[in-house]
Amino acid sequence: MAQQSGGGNVVLDFILRGRLVTQIVVGLVAGVILAAVWPAAGLAVGLLGDFFVGALKAVAPVLVLILVCAAITNHKTDSQARMGPVVALYLIGTFAAAVLAVVASFVFPVTLQLTGIPEEMAAPQGLGEVVKNILLKLVDNPANAIAEANYIGILAWAIALGLVFRHGSDTVKSLMSDLDAGITNIVKAIIRLAPIGIFGIVASTIAATGFGALVGYANLLALLVGCMLAMALVVNPLIVFLRMRKNPYPLVFTCLRESGITAFFMRSSAANIPVNIELCRRMNLDEETYAVTIPVGATVNMGGAAITITVMTLAAVNTLGIEVDFASAVLLSVIAAVAAAGASGVAGGSLLLIPMAASLFGIDNATAMQVVSIGFIIGVVQDSAETALNSSTDVLFTAAGSYKQGDPYPRKLPLDAVPV
């Protein structure tokens, strides 16, 4: 009896205080097994995944509003916040991803089977429309911005309120600090549900779709995922090394492990904002920096989206036999990078920007929407890998941008010693 009680305590301790990544792996394996052995049950437990993602999506807008507002309200004149370098890394990384995708598409060209046109898909028709949408989101009603998870609008209101509250009384500043601490505790509680949520997501996804539909697009998927892996493991580390002049891989692997895994299964940069903010907190980064750069990154740091837009567009170009010169390739990289920054932070957000990039080569909207439909077919892998790259890079560049010459490296990363 004593041994059983001891075993029970071990299990309970693992559930309550075990490392989150280990628990997620257990949930992942359990989800795959359940979907393979009992597909009907796999579909049923999808509710657990929906609940987890829904909880993150519900808390994320409020988290961003309060965290950014509190950071600005209590901002100190001697603050070490370094938002400029982080945003610069975001822009460099997104453009580098587009260039990488262009080069890879030339070296490993792929073609598509374009059949069937999906109906009722509204895609922006030009870069001007993307810019217009961003500006309109900027001046959105605050209640509507929170309800619709419009992070551009939420950031605008959070910054405006923070600037006003900075001149408020000590009571106002104390209230914002208390709200900050309260929402952080709520986020921690939700993140502890990640293993159960991942279990439900994996089980229901495999039970519903399987992977048979992906076989016909193996070459396209290999190119997309290969570009994203190269970006995550080669280009991003190079960018971080040039910034820090230190071995980037401990930081790279930490971000991929602690942020990329959850983002892969949730397929939403917006939903992964609470995970990234909690990771930055545990990495002892400056709160006034990551409170702003993480939600900004979920909106504009879209290297994975730039890869998707570029690769899918050039696949259509190759299929139609259109010649692409150097100038057009460079222009495509610029357009893909800018368009990616306007991509929605939800699953499949980058796909509807493909017609805009395709129009650069004279491809009509009907044909481009066929490419979009293929994107949705392979989205179970493509969008997961894209989101993992986007979201993990938000933390990576925030940490790298916060680094100053002379700081110890790794900069207080006790992640292996502290249960997540």
Image (tube, rainbow, N blue to C red):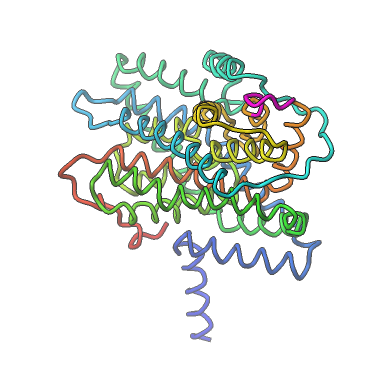
Q: Which is nearer the eye, 225 or 168?
A: 225
Q: Quadrant of residue 115?
A: top right
Look at the picture and state if 349 lies above or below 283: above
Q: Which residue is at a point 79% across and 63% down the rendered structure image? A: 39
**Residue 86 image point, x, y percent:** 34, 33
How many numbered markers are drawn? 0
Tell me residue 47's x, y (percent): 71, 51
Residue nearer the viewer, 34 or 385: 385
From the viewer's perspective, is residue 124 above or below residue 260?
A: above
Left-right relation of 95 to 407: right
Which of 381 and 107 lies nearest the eye of the viewer?
107
- Where residue 394 sits, quadrant-wise, is top left
Looking at the picture, does residue 346 appear above or below residue 2? above
Residue span colored magenta: 358-364
Q: Residue furthest left?
A: 406
In the rendered view, tell whether residue 44 sits above or below residue 133: below
* Image quarter of the C terminus: bottom left
Q: Tell me the residue at 23%/25% (across/down).
A: 76
Image coords of residue 256 (percent x, y): 45, 53
Name the residue rendered at 61%, 26% in the picture.
147
Q: Is residue 242 left or right of residue 146?
A: left
Q: Residue 339 placed where, x, y %? A: 55, 27
Residue 72 sits inside the magenta stretch: no
